[in-house]
Every structure is written in C-alpha cells, then in structure tokens.
Image: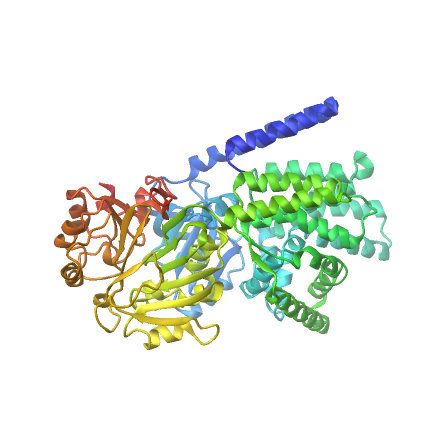
C-alpha cells in the first residue's frame, strides 16, 4: 500500500507531526528510533541484496546445504532452497524429473543434506508485467537472491550430524509428513495453520476466501498461538505444575515453534505479542506495548514486512483489536475490521464481495471457537484417535462448501487497483471513520471516496494497446477510452513438450493478462480475436473464459468447428463464435479484418490480420502470418501502411518480408517472444532488417509489458522494464 517515495515521506512527516503534538518526549524518541531502525534495516537489506545477487546468467558448480522442509515436488519438477556453502547465499534450485519413483525419493528426504549441483545460476526474475505477482520480492523476503536451474538431478550427501536449527526444520518436515496422511482438507489446514506450509489442494478455498474478503482471518491467525498457549497452560495445571513454570517453559519454547512454523509475518507478530504477554508481570507492559514490540521485532526480522498483504493486514487488524472500544458489538467489530482491511485487499486482490462486510461476524467465532480448536485437537490426536480427525474433516468440507457457495453469490465487484495516493487516502479516511464510527457523516465521506476511486479506475479518459509479456506467445489487449470496449487478440499459451500440463487456474495468463485486466477494473471482454489455432496463441483461452465474461470470439473461417477450439471453449457460458474473412463486416469499430481471404485450416498462413488506428497511429497485428501471406495482403491492399507493426511469428524469419516492411514503413516494430525460447526468436536477420530501415524495436523480452497509452489524437509508449534490467536473458541480436 506504500506508494512512491515522495508520498511515503509525506506520510512519515505527518505521523511525526502528530507525535510531536502529543508533547511526550519518550513517545517522540521511541518513534524516531523506530523510524531510524526501519530505514537502516531497509538500506542494509538493499545493500545485502545487491551484494548477493549475481549480475547475470552463467554456469556454476557448487555445494548447497538443503533442509528437508525446503523441498517441494510438484508437476514433475523439484524445487528447493538452500545455502551455497561457499558464498553463504540462499538460492532456489529447480530441475525436472520424469521418473515417478525418483520423485518419491525426493519427497522422502528426511534430513539436512549437501546437494552437489551443476547448472545455470541467474538472478530471480522480476515482475515483467504491470501488477504481476512480484516473485523476486517474494524470494527476497525469504532471503533467497538467486536461482539455479540444474542440468541434471543433484548428487546428494545426507549429513550425519546437525545443529538445533536444522533439527527444528527436520521436525517441521516430520510434522508435514504426519499431516499429509490425514484426509483433505484437514491435512491442508494443519499444514497451513500449524507449520505455515501452503497446500495446493486448498488453493481454490484460499481464492474464495480472498474473494469474500475474509483473508484477514488467516492473517491474524495468531489466534491459534493464543489457543495453543491456553491448551498447554491447561495441561500444566492438570499435571500440577506451577503457573510460573509453565509460562517460563512457553517463553523458551515459542521461538522454536516460530522456526518450526515457518516464520510468516503474522506468526512473528503473534509469537512476539505472546512472549510480551507472558512477561507482562515482569516488564509491566500492556497489550498495546506488546503490539508495538512485535512491530519493531517484525521490521527487524523482515524490513519489508509492511509491503506484503499478510504483513499489512496482520499488524493493522491486530492493532485495531487492541485499541477498539470494548463496548463495540461483535457484528459492528467484524464490519469495522472488514472495512479497515479493504484498502490493502484492493491494492493486492483488486476485487471484493459485498458479503465481506458482514461475513466476518459468524466467521470470527467459528474460527476461534470451532475451526482452530478442532484442527489443533485433530493434529494432536490423529495418531491415536483418527475418528476425531475424520469428524473434523467433515466440518471443514462443509465449511469449504459454504465458502464456495457464498463466493459464487451475486455481489462480487472487480474494483481495480487504486493508485498509491488513492490507497493511502482510503486508508487514512478509514482510520478516521473507525475512530468515530458512530458519526454517519464520516461513513458518507468514506463512501464518496470509494465511489470517486471506482469512477476514476473504471472510466479512464485514455485508451490502451497493451502487449502482454506472456512468454513464447501472443496476447494483446485493446481498451477504448472510458472502457467503452475491451478486446483481446490471442490469449497466449504454452507448448508442454511432454511435461505435465498445469491446471488452468495456475497458468501464466492468471498472473499476467487476467491479473492486469482486473487491476484495471475490467471483468469482461467484448471480443477475443484468435489469429489461428497454435497453442501459443489460444492455449490460455479456457483460463480467460473462466475469469472473464466474454461476449464473442472471432476466428479465421474454417477454425470454428475444429476440436482444438471447441474443446477449449467448452459448453458452459459459451460465447458466440464468429468465423471471419476479410469480407466480414467489422465486429468492433476500432479494428478491421484484412486476412484471411477465404476459409482455411487456421494454420500460420491462414492467420487473422487486423488493423486499427489508435491515438493517431495505425497498428497492424499479423499473428503468425508467413511471408507469402504478407505479400498477398499487400496485393489486396496496395495503399496499406502502418506506424506500429506487431511482427509476425514472434520475429521469425518466416515472416517480415522485405517488401512488406518497405511498403508499410512502420516506425515501431513490436516483438512478442519468450526468453530463452527454443526457436531463438527473434531471428538475427529480421532484427538487422528492422534496424537497417530505422524501425525502432520494442520486444517483450527486453521491456516486458509494452503499453501504448493514447488519447484521441496522441499517444505514447510505456514499458514495465526500462530495457537494461534483463540483458543476460536477451539474444545477441537485441543486445547489440
């Protein structure tokens, strides 16, 4: 939620001014020291990142210490994190394994080991699309700075002795294996709530939880720490142990549990607050002091903790629980917590459900009284009394069905991502409203603020032509001013070459094109134009149809009845499919169809070619049309020209004929191709031909998402990357 540096420093200055007005020197000194700690920690973290991140991609042979709980096996790939014994840098390892028996061997690795690896080391890739999940930041928050792609499975040497820290991680792995034998979804809840491991089988439930806006129930899941302490205290009393002795043992044990449970931001906060609570008699502190200490420790543990959704919600909502009027009813409290979490949720999820305002009311007692206790009791007794776990599992299944049912009810709003200044403004107004929640005028001002942000996001005066960095494929989004129409040319897709196909809900389109559309407040597409049938152009169509309301699909004539299309479209909420040729009248006024001239097989030579004028510049989109097709288009349209040309076939030499380039004479050439693609796109000769004609090249490989933002008569290109960040990924022709 924190915005650019000027806004951030303005916000800090405001907070310091408020503290100065209190006229309490101790509070002022404490705040200044905390601010210096945060700034110093961030600067030190940035220096550490720069020092330990490799500058480019190069071969490496090294020995990496890997703990058993840092290994993941999924979809034929093994991923692990470990410490390079030479540089002492944490790295992510990834390699593919096709042998099912060998995959099981990696799942059963139960102790720390030295992995002798050979492969290519590279920095973790940054987000290359607007509002895409920042994988690099995610890894950096876990002290992982580089990624090694192994040429072959590593040689593993198990350790015969290890320290207490390694033993804690081994206990975590053993708990994970113990939970894995439980039925789903109980196994997933035990893993997530007790040891902080995500379970792929619970992804749909977590997606529904986010849609309903009750993700904060998991982010303030320190509830289970409080419950665990209460249970252990009860056991201590039952064993006739002194209360002070039990508290002392808990103070010593909680840090170990923090390591075993994965050290998530919400858990760090909960454990520190619990420690301060246990020491309250000695320290003379209150609950708010415990929250403040947990924030300081959390920032020292992870300086960027407040830049993640989990960190923001955990600290914000736990703070409100400490300062909120004790006379507030449970229903009103749940509404206030939901309203408080909304600015952060919109900044990361871009949508909310109207039910989120009231659903916390029954959910909070259900989590604290039923779900958490049942999960903890089941985890502790499953080895002896599995019937308790089976009954708990039935409760969880009912809970998941109810959550799915509620998430599917009408009321979901794709709000879009507020700009930084909007997010901070909504957050401050929300705190002001909560401090005087009985004043109806304040609620009216907050509603007006949300309505204003919604209008600004949903009715932008400018339009966009966006080339999504979707890997080795094409995906172009065209949005008219004020969102009058939204069109998509191709969806992207991936050729798997024998690897297991990932579920459509987890493919690249979900985190790129779909995520970008929702961040702009868009939940529908008027027309999807599919240039031809290749997987890298239509492979993600099912994902788009699942996440967007699509009115119609235009395809080259002859493709409408091909199984490769009908299988992807399915039968549920099927949009209208329109076969087209160049004689077909325009479906959308912004685009005109130039090719194909007759029905065909929807192969490269039958690719749909589209043209349109945006912001005073003419664009031509050619799909994978070959050189013969390009020349045929010129024969039909001898006056055709272009300012911006989306190069055919990802910059392959099978397209971009000299005659085609000479007659169109574009100023800009857009290339959509994947990094390290096996086809070596773009071709050196094509790039040289473009440069010879002084055509400026913009490639998604180099610049990530490419956006042409336009008004009726003017426009400008904007790119997610500046062009020099990923030189080590580029082919030589783009680096020269």
Q: Nearer the viewer, residue 168 or 294?
A: 294
Up the image or down, 576 lies above or below 312; here it is below
Where is residue 267? Give x, y as percent.
65, 48
Quarter-wise, where is residue 694 in the image? top left
Residue at 79%, 46% in the rendered image: 247
Residue at 61%, 51% in the rendered image: 168
Where is residue 587? Give x, y as percent.
35, 64
Up the image or down, 406 lies above or below 226; here it is below
Quarter-wise, where is residue 588 in the image? bottom left
Residue 730 visible in this rendered orientation of the protein = yes
Up the image or down, 493 lies above or below 52; here it is below
The quarter of the rendered structure image containing the N terminus is: top right
Q: Nearer the viewer, residue 494 or 559?
A: 559
Where is residue 233? Give x, y as percent.
81, 52
Q: For this view, does 564 lie left or right of residue 78?
A: left
The quarter of the rendered structure image containing the C terminus is: top left
Residue at 81%, 36% in the rendered image: 282
């Amino acid at each position: 939620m924190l915005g650019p540096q000027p806004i951030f420093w303005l916000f800090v200055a405001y907070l310091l001014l408020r503290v100065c007005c209190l006229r309490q020197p101790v509070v002022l000194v404490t705040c200044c020291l905390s601010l210096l700690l945060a700034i110093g920690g961030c600067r030190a973290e940035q220096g550490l990142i720069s020092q330990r991140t490799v500058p480019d991609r190069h071969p490496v042979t090294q020995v990496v210490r890997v703990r058993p709980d840092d290994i993941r096996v999924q979809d034929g790939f093994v991923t692990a994190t470990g410490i390079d014994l030479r540089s002492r840098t944490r790295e992510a390892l990834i390699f593919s394994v096709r042998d099912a028996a060998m995959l099981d061997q990696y799942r059963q690795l139960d102790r720390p080991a030295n992995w002798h690896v050979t492969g290519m080391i590279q920095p973790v890739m940054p987000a290359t699309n607007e509002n895409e999940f920042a994988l690099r930041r995610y890894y950096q928050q876990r002290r992982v700075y580089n990624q090694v792609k192994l040429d072959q499975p590593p040689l593993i040497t198990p350790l015969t002795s290890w320290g207490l820290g390694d033993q804690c991680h081994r206990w975590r792995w053993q708990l994970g294996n113990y939970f894995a034998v439980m039925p789903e979804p109980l196994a997933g809840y035990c893993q997530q709530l007790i040891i902080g491991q995500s379970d792929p089988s619970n992804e749909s439930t977590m997606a529904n939880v986010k849609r309903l806006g009750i993700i904060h129930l998991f982010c303030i899941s320190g509830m289970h720490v409080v419950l665990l302490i209460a249970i252990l205290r009860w056991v201590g009393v039952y064993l006739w142990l002194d209360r002070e002795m039990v508290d002392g043992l808990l103070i010593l044990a909680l840090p170990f549990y923090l390591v075993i449970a994965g050290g998530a931001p919400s858990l760090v906060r909960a454990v520190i607050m619990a420690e301060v609570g246990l020491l309250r008699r000695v320290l003379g502190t209150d609950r708010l002091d415990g929250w403040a200490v947990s924030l300081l420790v959390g920032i020292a543990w992870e300086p960027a903790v407040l830049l993640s959704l989990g960190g923001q919600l955990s600290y914000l909502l736990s703070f409100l629980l400490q300062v909120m009027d004790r006379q507030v009813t449970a229903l009103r409290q749940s509404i206030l917590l939901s309203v408080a979490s909304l600015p952060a949720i919109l900044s990361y999820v871009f949508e909310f459900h109207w039910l989120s305002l009231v659903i916390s009311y029954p959910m909070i007692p259900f989590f604290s009284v039923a779900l958490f206790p049942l999960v903890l009791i089941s985890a502790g007794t499953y080895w002896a009394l599995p019937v308790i776990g089976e009954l708990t599992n039935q409760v969880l299944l009912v809970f998941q069905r109810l959550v799915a049912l509620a998430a599917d009810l009408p009321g979901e709003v794709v709000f879009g991502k507020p700009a930084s200044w909007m997010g901070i403004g909504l957050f401050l107004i929300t705190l002001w409203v909560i401090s005087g929640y009985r004043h109806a005028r304040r609620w009216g001002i907050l509603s007006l603020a949300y309505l204003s942000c919604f209008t600004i996001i949903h009715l932008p005066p400018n339009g966009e032509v966006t080339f999504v960095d979707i890997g080795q494929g094409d995906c172009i989004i065209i949005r008219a001013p004020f969102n009058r129409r939204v069109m998509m040319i191709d969806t992207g897709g991936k050729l798997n070459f024998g690897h297991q196909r990932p579920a459509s809900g987890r493919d690249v389109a979900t985190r790129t094109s779909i995520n970008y559309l929702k961040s702009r407040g868009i939940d529908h597409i008027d027309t999807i134009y599919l240039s031809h049938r290749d997987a890298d152009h239509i492979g993600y169509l099912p994902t788009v149809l699942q996440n967007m309301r699509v009115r119609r699909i235009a395809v080259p004539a002859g493709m409408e009845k091909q199984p490769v299309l009908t299988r992807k479209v399915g039968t549920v909420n099927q949009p209208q499919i329109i076969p087209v040729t160049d004689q077909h009248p325009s479906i959308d006024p912004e685009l005109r169809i130039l090719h194909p001239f007759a029905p065909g097989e929807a192969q490269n030579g039958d690719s749909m070619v589209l043209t349109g004028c945006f912001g005073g510049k003419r664009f031509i989109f050619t799909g994978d049309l070959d050189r013969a097709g390009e020349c045929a288009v010129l024969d039909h349209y001898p006056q055709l020209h272009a300012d911006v040309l989306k190069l055919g076939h990802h910059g392959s030499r099978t397209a971009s004929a000299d005659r085609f380039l000479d007659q169109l004479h574009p100023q800009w050439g857009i290339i959509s191709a994947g990094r390290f693609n096996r086809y070596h796109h773009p071709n050196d000769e094509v790039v040289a031909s473009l440069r010879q004609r002084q055509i400026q090249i913009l490639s998604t490989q180099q610049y990530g998402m490419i956006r042409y933002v336009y008004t009726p008569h003017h426009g400008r290109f904007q790119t997610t990357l500046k062009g020099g960040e990923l030189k080590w990924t580029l082919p030589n022709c783009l680096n020269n």
